[in-house]
Image: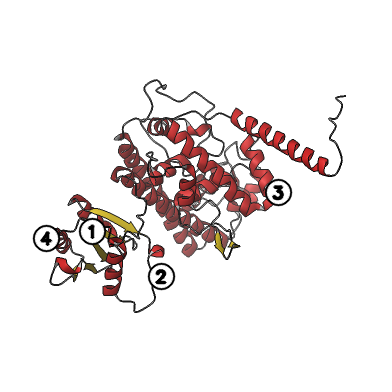
């Protein structure tokens, strides 16, 4: 095949070794291996430069590719990060040397597509938010350990109040660990907003307090509070990183989003000290996307860290939804549709859109009606995916145009859909020799 990139190289990424292949006429030894130490990676980049390589294709294997990617990008190489699904289709022997040579050949022929990777500033925010998700998961595991210890002591307090880590739950746990065993005294720690009566709470606190279970409860509670401290520090670091971005609002846009009724912050919601998360998202995205039903500040923070705000990598909303894996993946052979199921794409952005779609079940907006209608017609899983697809298109449009969300657009679309349905019914009636007559207004 003709070579479109004659100065291309291929790298098979590993945990301890990197196998590199360059064009055959570039060096007497066109395939070499390097260790993953920083000094060796710098030597790898220097060798590529001496071979006249300008672009490099490498596989996105775990997180092993990140140090080499950053070094090559800093040295001026055009790095093509490739998904393994796009190039591992050739039969034959499977070795590291063959992999790097096959990567180099495909990249030289222009047959590889680079994976989307936002700018380094956005990647920094993405790393912090992904780390924050890990802290939340770790804190949740300690909550489960607390519930296990309470169950072993037959204290059913976590079954009569909704959140054991709330104000009432933590106060009761601290009192139990401090040595208080009087259920009447413990029930007085109940917050007035708790719907459960003090009598039921006192009854749920009758059990046996064995030393081994109290010890595990104490350590789980200390670990949970430690992770809450780490979450606060992580929120401060995320706020610092996001504050370094320039504002994306157009010159004639207001400096702050329109005032609305503030939503109650729950659980592990992202919290900033200097400003609100909603104001910061408005400054970064240039539009108040919290007006879109289903979009909260946490969802927008995740989408910003995973996608960024520069949508030039996606020429259209169809390309964007295809990258997310929210559109039908048609598989056709012999003019026959084999499957139209959506591709399995492990994307945090797609997961955020699906979670936003599920939150529309009780929404009285047009998007809520759309979600419930599709769930009734297609089933819950397909309805969630279809609604997430619509939310992704709305997100793409608002981010590209910096416009505000307008609910009346859905009314216009519904009117056009009704007119189209009326024309279709009139055509079918004509074929049957009938005529549609408008109903009389009573």
Tag 2–tag 1 contact (CB < 8 Å): no
Tag 4–tag 3 contact (CB < 8 Å): no
Q: Nearer the viewer, residue 71 or 276?
A: 71
Mark 2, Cα crowd under 10 Å, few <14 / some 14-19 / many 20+, is few
Where disc 2 sits, the SS reads: loop
Image coordinates of residue 110 in percent, x first then y, are 32, 59
Where disc 1 sits, the SS reads: helix
Mark 1, Cα crowd under 10 Å, few <14 / some 14-19 / many 20+, is many
Drawn side of residue 88 relative to residue 330, left or right? left
Where disc 4 sits, the SS reads: helix
Question: In the picture shown, does residue 248 fall above or below 132?
Answer: above
Alpha-carbon span between mark 4 and mark 1: 17 Å
Mark 1 and mark 3 lie on one chain; the one further toward the N terminus is 1
Q: Which residue is mark 1?
A: 68
Q: Nearer the viewer, residue 355 or 118?
A: 118
| Number of on-image labels | 4
Alpha-carbon span between mark 3 and mark 2: 40 Å
Image coordinates of residue 129 in percent, x first then y, are 38, 47
Q: Which residue is mark 2?
A: 89
Residue positioned 38% across, 69% down in the render: 88
Where disc 3 sits, the SS reads: helix
Q: Marks 3 and 2: which is nearer the front? A: 2
Residue positioned 62% across, 47% down in the render: 201
Q: Nearer the viewer, residue 21 or 251?
A: 21
Question: In the picture shown, does residue 331 fall above or below 123?
Answer: below
Alpha-carbon span between mark 4 and mark 3: 62 Å
Residue 97, quarter of the rendered image: bottom left
Q: Which residue is mark 3?
A: 376
Q: Quadrant of the C terminus?
A: top right
The disc placed on residue 50 is 4
Residue 49, quarter of the rendered image: bottom left
């Amino acid at each position: 095949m003709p070579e479109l990139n004659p100065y291309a190289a291929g790298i098979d990424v590993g945990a301890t070794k990197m196998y590199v292949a360059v064009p055959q006429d570039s060096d007497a030894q066109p395939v070499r291996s390097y260790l993953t130490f920083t000094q060796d990676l710098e030597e790898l980049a220097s060798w590529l430069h001496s071979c006249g390589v300008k672009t490099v294709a490498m596989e996105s294997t775990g997180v092993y590719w990140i140090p080499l990617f950053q070094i090559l990008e800093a040295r001026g190489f055009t790095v093509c990060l490739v998904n393994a699904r796009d190039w591992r289709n050739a039969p034959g022997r499977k070795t590291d040397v063959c992999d790097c040579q096959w990567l180099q050949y495909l990249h030289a022929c222009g047959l590889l597509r680079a994976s989307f990777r936002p700018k380094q500033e956005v990647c920094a925010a993405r790393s912090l938010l992904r780390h924050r998700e890990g802290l939340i998961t770790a804190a949740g595991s300690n909550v489960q350990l607390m519930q296990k210890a309470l169950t072993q002591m037959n204290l059913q307090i976590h079954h009569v109040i909704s959140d054991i880590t709330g104000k009432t739950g933590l106060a009761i746990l601290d009192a139990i660990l401090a040595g208080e065993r009087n259920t009447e005294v413990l029930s007085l720690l109940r917050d007035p907003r708790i719907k459960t009566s003090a009598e039921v709470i006192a009854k749920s606190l009758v059990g046996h307090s064995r030393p081994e279970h109290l010890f595990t409860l104490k350590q789980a509670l200390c670990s949970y509070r430690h992770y809450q401290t780490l979450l606060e520090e992580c929120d401060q670091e995320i706020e610092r990183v996001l504050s370094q971005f320039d504002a994306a609002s157009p010159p004639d846009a207001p400096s702050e989003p329109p005032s609305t009724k503030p939503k109650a912050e729950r659980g592990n919601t992202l919290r900033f000290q200097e400003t609100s998360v909603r104001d910061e998202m408005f400054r970064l995205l240039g539009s108040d996307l919290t007006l879109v039903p289903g979009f909260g500040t946490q969802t927008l923070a995740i989408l910003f860290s995973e996608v960024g705000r520069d949508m030039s990598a996606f020429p259209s909303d169809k390309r964007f939804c295809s990258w997310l894996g929210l559109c039908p993946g048609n598989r056709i052979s012999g003019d026959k549709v084999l499957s139209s199921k959506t591709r399995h794409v492990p994307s945090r952005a797609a997961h955020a859109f699906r979670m936003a779609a599920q939150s529309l079940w009780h929404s009285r907006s047009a998007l809520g009606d759309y979600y419930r209608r599709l769930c009734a017609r297609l089933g819950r899983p397909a309805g969630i995916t279809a609604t997430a697809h619509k939310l992704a298109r709305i997100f793409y449009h608002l981010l590209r145009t910096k416009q505000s969300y307008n609910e009346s657009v859905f009314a216009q679309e519904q009117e056009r859909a009704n007119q189209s349905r009326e024309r279709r019914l009139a055509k079918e009636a004509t074929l049957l020799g009938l005529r549609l007559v408008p109903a009389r207004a009573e």
